[in-house]
Image (cartoon, rainbow, N blue to C red):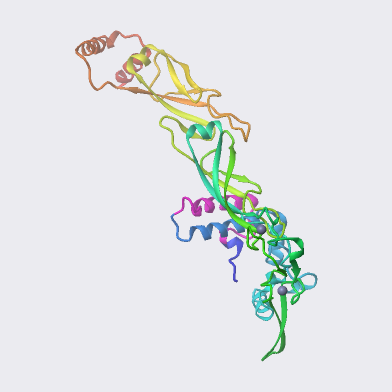
């Protein structure tokens, strides 16, 4: 019953700014994400963090929470504000009236179905260009035969005669504090508020059926590792005609053999020979859209970074596109043929008179000492 304070969960002060809340949430969500976390009880902690963030990131809910200790506002209606901040009240309330707040909700009220979570692993290219994927999700769907009522026909649904549809019954008890009325779940209908005379043959009265659903997902171009897609209404079936839950898809992106991604930018290393950089050349560089020519000027140093504008990822969600950055890496030959060895020796002897800028720079460097 005793929930941890939302501010405590996120490790922030009561007067934290929106940015501080967001930052704390991001750090903790990463730390406890059930798919990547190695922390014990990661899933529970993740949910706790999610709940705290959902409340504190919404100004209205946060204000309610600060005032009444609940994001729904004053749980006791008008005149009950005097109890705010009195932590033990709810427990006392529950022990007297059974169940507390929840049991007072009508059992027939529409409720949103549960949210579902799943993962998709994409290749580097699929994430960059976007892809259509079919995923399989096990979920409860509203029974199509009875439309969720659980009965064979409308006439087979009857309001519970014991609780008159409220789902709860009041029992009088004698206690040391005197005569006390306790509210409890109706034993006749088990809180449903209605009775079904003839059950639907398809769902046997449940109103929902567990199914393997095949869902087509349009993954937008530019999605990145650890991002989440939300498919509204693709979670579990709603209860009593409430809306369906949502489906959250966690995206994982596999590493690429050559490309390294940072946001919408792509980084690649380009191995070149000593003579290619000394003399200058045009290289065919691998990009997401195939090979593109890149001019390497004579005298380029190893480690030089070239920008290929607009050759990065075209992000469909943000509408922005990235660049490709090419870092030149001069490869020193490890095995030389006899002829190559001769050439390098000749080159070595010409160093004194060499006019290339590289050799000039080296000369200046050594003569300084
Ligand atoms: Zn009943
Ligand atoms: Zn049914």
Which residue is pictured at 70% across the width and 57% down the height? 146
Of 305 and 284, nearer the camera is 284
Magenta segment: does it hold 243? no
Q: From the viewer's perspective, is 164 left or right of 350?
A: right
Of 291 and 325, nearer the camera is 291
Q: From the viewer's perspective, is 317 left or right of 251?
A: right
Which residue is pictured at 65% across the width and 47% down the height? 232
- The answer to whether any part of residue 249 appears in the image is yes
Q: Quadrant of the N terminus?
A: bottom right
Which residues fall within the magenta stretch? 9-37
Outermost residue toward the left in this view = 338
Vertical arrangement, residue 346 with respect to residue 212, above or below: above
Q: Position of residue 267 (x, y in %)?
A: 46, 29
Q: Position of residue 198 (x, y in %)?
A: 69, 66
Q: Quadrant of the C terminus?
A: top left
- The answer to whether any part of residue 85 appears in the image is no
Q: Position of residue 275 (x, y in %)?
A: 33, 14
């Amino acid at each position: 019953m005793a929930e941890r304070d939302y501010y405590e969960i996120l490790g922030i002060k009561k007067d934290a700014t929106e940015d501080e809340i967001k930052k704390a949430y991001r750090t903790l969500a990463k730390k406890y994400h059930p798919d990547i976390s190695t922390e014990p009880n990661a899933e529970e902690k993740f949910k706790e963090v999610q709940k705290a963030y959902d409340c504190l990131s919404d100004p209205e809910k946060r204000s309610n929470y600060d005032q009444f200790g609940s994001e729904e506002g004053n749980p006791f209606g008008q005149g009950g504000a005097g109890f705010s901040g009195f932590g033990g009240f709810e427990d006392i309330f529950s022990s007297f009236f059974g169940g507390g707040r929840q049991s007072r909700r009508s059992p027939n009220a529409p409720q949103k179905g549960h949210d579902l979570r799943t993962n998709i692993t994409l290749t580097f290219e699929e994430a960059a260009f976007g892809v259509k994927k079919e995923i399989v999700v096990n979920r409860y769907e509203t029974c199509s035969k009875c439309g969720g009522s659980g009965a064979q026909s409308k006439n087979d649904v009857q309001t519970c005669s014991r609780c008159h549809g409220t789902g709860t019954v009041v029992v009088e008890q004698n206690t040391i504090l005197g005569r006390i009325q306790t509210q409890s779940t109706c034993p006749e209908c088990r809180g449903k508020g209605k009775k079904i005379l003839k059950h639907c043959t398809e769902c046997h009265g449940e109103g929902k059926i567990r199914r393997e659903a095949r869902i087509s997902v349009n993954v937008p171009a530019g999605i990145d590792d650890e991002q989440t897609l939300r498919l509204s209404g693709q979670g579990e079936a709603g209860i009593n005609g409430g809306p369906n839950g949502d489906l959250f898809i966690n995206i994982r992106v596999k590493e690429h053999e050559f490309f390294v991604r940072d946001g919408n930018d792509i980084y690649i290393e380009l191995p070149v020979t000593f003579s290619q950089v000394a003399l200058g050349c045009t290289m065919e560089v691998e990009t997401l859209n195939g090979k593109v020519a890149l001019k390497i000027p004579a005298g380029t140093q190893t480690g030089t970074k070239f920008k290929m504008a607009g050759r990065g990822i075209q992000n469909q969600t943000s509408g922005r596109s990235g660049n490709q950055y090419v870092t030149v890496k001069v490869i020193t030959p490890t095995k030389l043929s006899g002829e190559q060895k001769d050439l390098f020796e000749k080159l070595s002897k010409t160093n004194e008179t060499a006019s290339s800028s590289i050799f000039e720079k080296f000369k200046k460097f050594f003569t300084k000492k």
